[in-house]
Image (cartoon, rainbow, N blue to C red):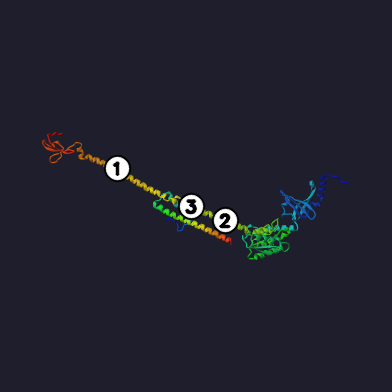
Amino acid sequence: MTLTITVSQLNSYIKTLMEADEQLYDIAVRGEISNYTVHSSGHHYFTLKDKTSSLKCVMFRREAAHLQFRPQTGMSVLAGGRITVYEAGGQYQLYASWLQPDGIGAQFLALEELKKKMAALGYMDESRKKPLPPFPQCVGVVTSPTGAAWHDIQKVAKSRWPAIELILFPALVQGDGAPEAIAQAIAKANASPKLEVLIVGRGGGSMEDLWCFNSEEVAMAIIHSRLPVVSAVGHEIDFTLADLVADRRAATPSAAAEIVVPDSRALEQKLFHLEQHIKTNAKMFLDSKKQDLRQLQSKAVFTQPQLFLEASWRHLENSGEDMERLMETTCHNMEEKITALAGRLHILDPLATLSRGYALCQKADGTLLTRAQDTVPGETITARLAQGSLHCQVLNLKETK
Amino acid sequence: MSKKDPKPTFAQAMEELEDIVQKMEEGELSLEEMLEQYAQGIQLLKECKSRLSAAEKQMEKLSADLEDQEND
C-alpha cells in the first residue's frame, strides 16, 4: 500500500534522511559559479553547475569573510560544506563553509597575489603614470594584425587626425606564447625613436582569451616602457593587470584611439571661436577707448575754451569797475573839500565883509583905522564902501573901553 | 612741459589728458598756465587720436592677413 503523507511530513522526512548521511555532512563539490550575488545581509548566494545539473549554494557572512579571492560567475571552483534541506521549500542546498578556485580559478588566486605584489611595489601608483603627449605624430599599436582591434584603431585614429602615423607591432594576443609575444612587441616599440605613445590591447573575448594581459611579463614590459602605454583590452568585467599598470586605461581599442589621437575638427572649431573672441575683444577695447577720447574731446575746455578765459575777463572788468568807483569817490571827496575851503575863503574875503555894510576907514596916509582914539576931530578920513568911497571929516569921537 | 617720459604710452597720454581737463575745469590756473595746459591738451588729444586710428588700421590689416591665409 502506498504511503500517504502531507508535504510537510515528506519534506521533514527527507531532511532527516539527508542530514543523517555522514557523507553529505562534509563534502566538496566541483562546479562553475553562476549568479553569484552578495546580499545586503553579507551572505553570499550562488549556484554551482556543470554540464547538466545545478546546485543552489549559500555562504554565510562569517565564512565569506575568510575568502581569499573574489568569486565570480564563470569561475570554476571547489565548494566545501554540508548539504541541508530547506524544509518549507522542499529544496536542498549546499551551506558552503569554504570556497577555492579550481583550474583557471587557481590562476585567479595567483593573479590576486600578483596584483598585491605589484601594488606594493608602487607599480600602480598614480604618480608613476606618465602623461600622454597631447599632439602625437607617431603612435605605436601592439595587437593582432588580423583582429578587429587594429582595424578599429586605424579607423578612429585617421578620422580624428588624418595625418597621424600608426605603426603596428603585431603579436599573439591569446593562448600560449602570447605574454612573451606582447612583451617583445612592447620592447620593440620602445626601441623605435620616433614613436611617442603606445596602445596595447585586443578586442573582446572570454576570460581565458584575455588572460595573457594578466601575465607578469606583459605587466613588466608595460612598467619598463619609456613610452606612455594605453591599455585597450576589450572587456566588461575586472581590469586586467595590464590595465592597472598602464599609464591610461581604455575600455576598448576604439576608445584608446580617441584618448591618444586629438580630434582635429573639434580643435578647428575651438580655434575658430578663439579667433572670434579675440576679434570681438579687440574691437570692444578700441571702441571703448574711442568713446573715452570722444568724451574728453566734447568737454567744454576743448569746445568752448574761451569760457575758461571768462574768469580772467571778469576779473579784469571788476578791477576796472573798482578803479572807476575809487576815482569817483576820490574826486567827490576832493570836490567837497574844495567847496568847504572855498566857503571858508569866501568868509575871509574883505569884499564880502564890505558887502554886508561894513566900511573900511583909512587915514590920509592910508593907515587903517580900528580905534576911535587913533583919530582926532576935524581929521579927514576916507571910508571905503563895497562900492565907492566917502571922503569924511571926523566930527567927534566916542571911545569904548 | 609736463611730459613724464619721452614717449608716453597711450594709457599715460589719456591719463595726462584727463588731468589737464580737470585742472582747467577747476579754474585755479593763471592765464599763462591756462594757455599752457590748453596747448598741451590739444597736443595730447591729437596724439591719442592718431594712435588709436593706427591701432585700428593695424588690426584690420592683421585680420585681412589671417583671411588670406585661410583662403590658401
Q: Element at badge 1?
A: helix
- Front residue of A311/A9: it is A311
Could you tell me if the residues under marks 2 and 1 are in contact, i.e. CB atoms within 8 Å? no
Closer to the camera in the image, A362 or A183: A362
A390 lies left or right of A103: left
The residue beneath circle 1 is A333
Give the residue type at disc 1.
Asn
Reply above or below: A72 against A351. below
Alpha carbon separation for disc pair 3 and 1: 59 Å
Disc 3 residue crowd, few under 14, some 14–19, many 20+, Cα 10 Å: few
> Does any portion of residue A122 appear in the rendered image?
no
Q: Look at label 3 and name its amino acid.
A: Arg
Question: Where in the figure is residue A272, as x and y percent of width and height?
Answer: 59, 57
Residue hosting label 3: A294
* Label 2 element class: helix
- Does residue A201 appear left or right of residue A337 in this picture? right
> Amino acid type of disc 2?
Gln
Chain under numbered label 3: A
Q: CA distance from mark 2 to mark 1?
A: 85 Å
Can residue B49 be spotted in the picture?
yes
> In this rendering, do the residues under marks 3 and 1 share a single chain?
yes
What is the chain identity of the residue bearing mark 1? Answer: A
Image coords of residue A26 (percent x, y): 78, 52
Q: Residues within 10 Å of mark 2 (few under 14, many from 20)?
A: few
Position of the C terminus of chain A, as image quadrant, is top left
Task: Tell which subunit mark 2 falls on.
Answer: A
Q: CA distance from mark 2 to mark 3?
A: 27 Å
Image coordinates for residue A254, horizontal then vertical, percent? 67, 59
Q: Position of residue B59 (x, y in %)?
A: 53, 58
Which sits earlier in the primary sequence, circle 2 or circle 1?
2
Which of pointers 2 and 3 lies earlier in the amino acid sequence? 2
